[in-house]
Amino acid sequence: MPTKIEKDSVTGHETTGHEWDGIRELNTPLPKWWVYVYIATVIWGIGMFVLYPAIPLGSWVTPGILGYSSRADAIAGVKEMAALHTTQMQEIGQKSFAEIEKNHDLMEVALTAGRITFANNCQPCHGPNGEGRVGYPALDTDVWRWGGSIEAIQQTITDGIRSNDPDARNSQMPNFGGDKLLTPDQINQVADYVISLYGKAKPNAATDAGAKLFADNCAPCHGAKGEGSREVGAPPLASHVHLYGDSREVVVAQITHPRMGVMPNWNKRLSPAMIKAVALYVHSLGGGE
Ligand code: HEC
Ligand code: HEC
């Protein structure tokens, strides 16, 4: 039914002419600000369309007159990061450990590079977080066989332990069983004494004979009280940290046939700067000697 268009007396707006049960629909105009914003966004959209890549056409897109490409942008960003990384690794190679530690940004780069290199190269032997495995020492304790200063760690990583490198850290625990330096009885006695050093021996198992055997045969490397010696990489025996385990069988086996773990030298595989970064990372795991 045609209705006539009239003005609403309250708002002054025109009505659309639609009416339901006496309720009339107003023809309220769009607010001015909204119309301007709308026109501005349309102009903005056309502008972007002309300037930037817009319509995808299979393997090609309309390129836009600025010639922008997000791929080129990303490649440039990666190149920039790589250049930054190279200069920072060069700095790590040139600076002393003390200088690197004072430089927050450089230290962050070193620890990140060290962590990644550790995961790629060291983790199979020393465990994901340097917690060690049987035969492979934990690097997150403050018990060190060769030394826990950054410089000592750097040297261990560079030249290795019993590796092929001429500068490798080297020492041999005598083969007390295989070379018949001690009888099986004597080995049992000295083993009981060793176990008593970390409080796991049965009462009265540690005898004077065992103590004397230890003083004569073991103390020159492991120290009079089993405190260990870094000169020969002899681990502390009076300790709760053990390379091979703390059971009696393990101690007897080690005295009978020492295993002599090998740690590879990394100077052929990692750059000196990268070795410094790993040394800083390993140092950050332990007691921080
Ligand atoms: C093939 C196994 C193996 C790999 C890989 C390996 N290590 Fe070792 N590492 C050893 C063994 C075994 C020892 C203990 C040798 C010994 O003194 O009897 C050792 C000892 C060490 C020590 C001396 C700990 C101390 O108490 O003084 C440090 C530090 C160390 N490794 C760091 C590293 C780092 C860093 C990497 C990676 C770049 C690495 N290792 C890779 C086997 C390995
Ligand atoms: C010439 C030095 C030397 C002498 C002497 C020596 N040791 Fe050792 N000992 C070492 C070294 C080096 C290691 C580490 C070896 C390895 O990685 O297998 C070691 C390791 C050990 C371990 C393993 C420690 C662990 O953390 O699991 C035990 C136990 C031990 N020695 C007991 C003895 C006893 C007992 C004697 C004397 C009967 C003795 N050693 C004499 C150098 C020595």
Image (tube, rainbow, N blue to C red):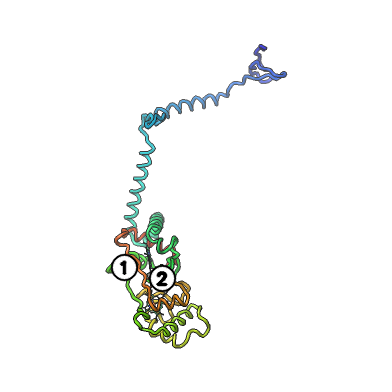
As drawn, which residue projects farthest toward the right?
21
Quarter of the rendering containing residue 111:
bottom left
Q: Name the residue under label 2.
A: 144
CB at mark 1 closer than 8 A to ligand 1? no
Which quarter of the image is occupied by the C terminus?
bottom left
**Rendering quadrant holding ligand 2:** bottom left
Instruction: Find residue 18 and report its horizontal and vertical position in percent.
Output: 66, 17
As drawn, which residue projects farthest toward the bottom?
208
CB at mark 2 closer than 8 A to ligand 1? yes
Q: Which mark is residue 232?
A: none
Q: Name the residue under label 1.
A: 163
Of 217 and 144, which appears nearest the observer?
A: 217
- For residue 279, above or below residue 200: above
Residue type (three-letter) at the residue carrying disc 1? Ser
Residue type (three-letter) at the residue carrying disc 2? Trp
Of 265 and 288, which appears nearest the observer?
A: 265
Picture residue at 35% right of the left edge, 83% below the top:
180
- For residue 239, above or below residue 204: above
| Helix, strand or loop at mark 1 | loop
Which quarter of the image is occupied by the N terminus?
top right
As drawn, which residue projects farthest toward the left?
166
Instruction: Find residue 225 and report its horizontal and vertical position in percent.
Output: 44, 81
Picture residue at 44% right of the left edge, 77% below the top:
251
Of 165 and 251, which appears nearest the observer?
A: 251
